[in-house]
Amino acid sequence: MIRVVDTTISSPAEILKTVRRPAPDEMEVSPRVMAKTQQIFQRALTPKEAVTQIVSDIRTKGDEALLDYARRIDGVELTASSMWVTQDELAQAKEEVSDEFLDALTLAVERIRSYHRQQLPNSWWNTDAKGVILGQKYTPLRVIGAYVPGGTAPLVSSLLMSCIPAQVAGVKEIVVATPAHAQGGIDPHILTAAEYLGIERVLKIGGAQAIAALAFGTETVPQVDKIVGPGNIFVTLAKKQVFGHVGIDMLAGPSEIMIIADEGANPVWVAADLLSQAEHDTDAAAVLVTPVRSLGEQVQRELAKQVDLLGRKEWALEALKRWGLIVYTKDLIEAAEVANLFAPEHLELCVADPFGYLEHIHNAGAIFLGNHTSESLGDYVAGPNHILPTNGSARFSSCLDVFAFVKRSSIIYYTEEALGAHGPKAAKLADVEGLQAHANAVRIRLDKGGA
């Protein structure tokens, strides 16, 4: 069910090559997806080629192409007006969800909002002895698009994680895009969450076609400044293609979890946490790193037991077979080396002193400390964002946060005295670079030319 490797036989770098997924445009695509693509386009296209066609059509034909792709890909008949969720639909959705869901939603929103408020940056400036004023001004983006997957499961939590940091940052307009089912409706839990946050613009279209519409705008879809939120390979490829015309958060790949565990870890809990990611997708990675062989053996037995209880058993089994791994290391220090090489999206430290061990961890999207801190808590109610860098990109990037929704502008003010002190040095550097006009723009002020 899951491969077992040992760092005494292969180096950590060699081991981790086997669970490093390819880039989105290099991933193997299932025959089912290829057959669907051929049916839609009447010819065989790779996902990258299909996305290129979709983006081009929507950029040039607007709503006409957008509605056509909604029909061809999702099998839903919409019009320019019915592709937007109405106020009546938002109100009706709340009647279709349970009180228990509303209680859970309330807690999640409160904690996510509270956490992200701690990130709010402040504009600032200071003045030196010569009167130069330097500073930084933070400005929220005007309008953003939040993509919420809805194909295999209604990802309410992704809506919260995309929209709440934007609201905290001061973004005034949020457009949510999520695919409708064949009857033209949206899951009531997603709509209830949107209504709870005060979001009124919900587009009933998903996939690459939604990303293209948000990036370039159509007759009825506004062009946004930035698109955030996870999605399948077509969504990810579309985000990659429109980047530059619009901002994006990241190119997120399939989910992944790594657990570092010592002899005190509970194998039942460890197996459950590995499966919590394996059930996401057949390309999800679940990795246990431990110096304790008996623990690894117990976890294997628990995986076999627990996977049979899952509604998404086939997905989890395939993910464990393809991307699951148990790595035996000589000690916990080497386990940290494995984690830093892999740079996992989620990293659980199920060790005796997780706070002391934290200093050894340099690369991870989110770090969960201690045996009671399941990754699932982070997905829903802990507060930090669960939209995280994947596939090794935690080496150089971070989770979605408030900073993703603000721009920084430098502020510079010079007095005449300060110009006299700094101007000649600026002109000299411009001379060295051969930029005469740059130097003249300073010297003409020093010489009071034109005054």
Image (cartoon, rainbow, N blue to C red):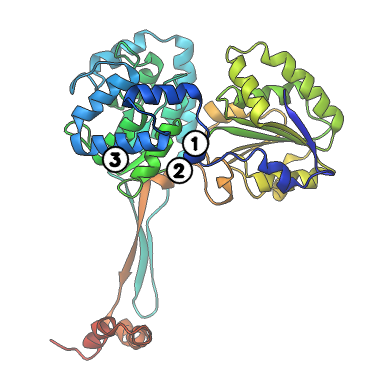
Q: Residue furthest left?
A: 450
Are discs 1 and 2 less than 8 Å apart at CB?
yes
Q: Earlier in the sequence, mark 1 or mark 2?
A: 2
Mark 1–mark 3 distance (CA, rounded to whole Å): 20 Å
Q: Can you identify the residue that label 3 sits on?
A: 215
Name the spot of residue 276 as percent of width and height, x first: 62, 23
Name the spot of residue 241 as percent of width and height, x first: 36, 43
Is 4 located above or below residue 72 in the figure? below
Image side of residue 317 versus residue 110, left or right: right
Q: In the rendered view of the protein, which quadrant contains the N terminus?
A: top right
* Mark drawn on residue 387: 1
Tell which of 60 and 311 is nearer to you. Answer: 60
Q: Secondary structure at mark 1?
A: loop
Is residue 248 something one can see in this rendering? yes
Is 293 located above or below residue 269 in the figure? below
Q: Can you identify the residue that label 2 sits on?
A: 250
Residue ID at (39%, 20%): 190
Q: Secondary structure at mark 3?
A: helix
Q: Amino acid at mark 1?
A: Ile
Mark 1–mark 2 distance (CA, rounded to whole Å): 9 Å
